[in-house]
Image (cartoon, rainbow, N blue to C red):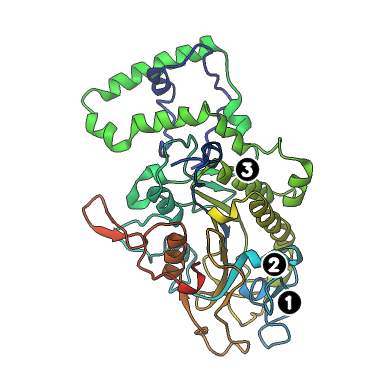
Amino acid sequence: MKLPNFSSIKFPRRPMERRDLLRWAAGLGMSFTLPGLTTRAAERRGTERPRSLLTIWLSGGPSQLETWDPHPGSLIGGPTRAIDTSIKGVQIAEGFPLLAGQLHHLSVIRSLTSREGDHDRATYTVKTGFRPDPTVTHPGIGAIVAHAQPSTELELPPVVSLGQENSPWKGGFLGGSFNALQVREPGQAGENVRDWIEEPRQQRRLDGLDLVGKRFLQGRGAVVNRTQHEHSIEAAIRMMTSEQVKAFEIDEEPEEIRAAYGDSNFGRGLLVARRLIEEGVRSVEVTLQNFDTHDDNFTRHQNHATVLDPAFAALLKDLAARDLLASTAVLCLGEFGRTPRINGAEGRDHWPHGFSCLVGGAGLKGGQLIGATDPAGEREKPEDPIGVDDLYATVLTALAIDPAHQVQTPIGRPIKYSNGKPIGRLLG
């Protein structure tokens, strides 16, 4: 969901009671949970940090051969060269020198597999861990993490999507309260939330909303309960009046930190993501678009690397320096990879049979290499194939969430968080 434009909002200067809050947001239609314990609160109380998931989504399907699984000098490698990394014996594409120095924080999986090669179906599969099913809508992995770790002190949405993503995480059968709050222009949301109007005009709006709300409630109690109308109102106001909303702003960050992440929508998104994780937000997704490289694959991946490399490297350094990496699972992937064959337009087509991802943090073992693809491009099946469901079962386990936990759908159907099996080699 897009963050609403609150440029015409001002809260009254008198203390606000719960009834005021509900009246105020009656028409906003925001859907996120009221929401345990935020990171900053954990620091104050000396308790364990909450665990979170931070996903870097490379939308469109990045080429494994131009990112984490290069095959220079081979029939399928094209012009892409490889460089050494901080993991002994592991190389990645030459466009990622900064990330190469931080790669020991993560492990590289080069044998991820999916059975879906269409963008929409593949996105659904990789974001949920399940193939599309006409009888049920599965929740995104980010929604699952938030659902399994409810919060009492978090005043921000527990699931947030940053950047221009057309398919942000959804709550699926867990409910709309676990849909991601979408902020398309990270680093600017706080300005919209805090630009308020004067009290007399605002009070007239409150009174009008109160009247509409009371009339709507008459004879529609079941509808109000089903749509979580009052819940959404209270959640919206709780966020708008919270100091935690500053996490969406980056102006107070030192100039050297902002420069390290890069002057891009994606770089600002990763910086906001770190700030949200610091506040205890359970799931954050940051999107870098336009990896659908059916043509001009090599130049386009080089251009993407100039944005992805500094921002991702800065994020890992920042998380480690702030002692957040131990409680934050970091995942970088797209909906599939790209064909070993180079087509006539100097591009690569869809390839779900053996693609790559980076994963680490939250106690997952870093510095490992799992799987391999055929440098001749003749074998479709990679060595040591890893299913997306197994990847997610592993991430959930690292976050102290039982992937086999069953949830009842609205029609009473029991479904597990994941049908996969955790990858023992990655678990500490």
Q: Residue at x 45, y 66 (%)?
A: 394
| Element class at badge 2 | helix
Residue pointed to by mark 1: 80
Q: Name the residue type under label 3.
A: Pro
Q: Secondary structure at mark 1?
A: loop
The numbered disc on residue 186 is: 3
Residue appearing at x 34%, y 46% in the figure: 175
Residue 113: tell me if it is visible: no
- Which amino acid, mark 2? His
Amino acid tagged 1? Thr
Asked if the residues shown at circle 3 and circle 2 are in contact, with their CB atoms under 8 angstroms apart, the answer is no
Question: Looking at the image, which is closer to me, 184 or 390?
Answer: 390
Mark 1 surroundings: few (<14), some (14-19) or many (≥20) residues within 10 A: many
Q: Are marks 1 and 3 in contact (CB under 8 Å)?
A: no
- Above or below 251: residue 426: below
- Provide residue 180's location: percent of width, then percent of height: 47, 46
Q: Earlier in the sequence, mark 1 or mark 3?
A: 1
Earlier along the polypeptide chain: callout 1 or callout 2? 1
Q: Which residue is the site of mark 2?
A: 301
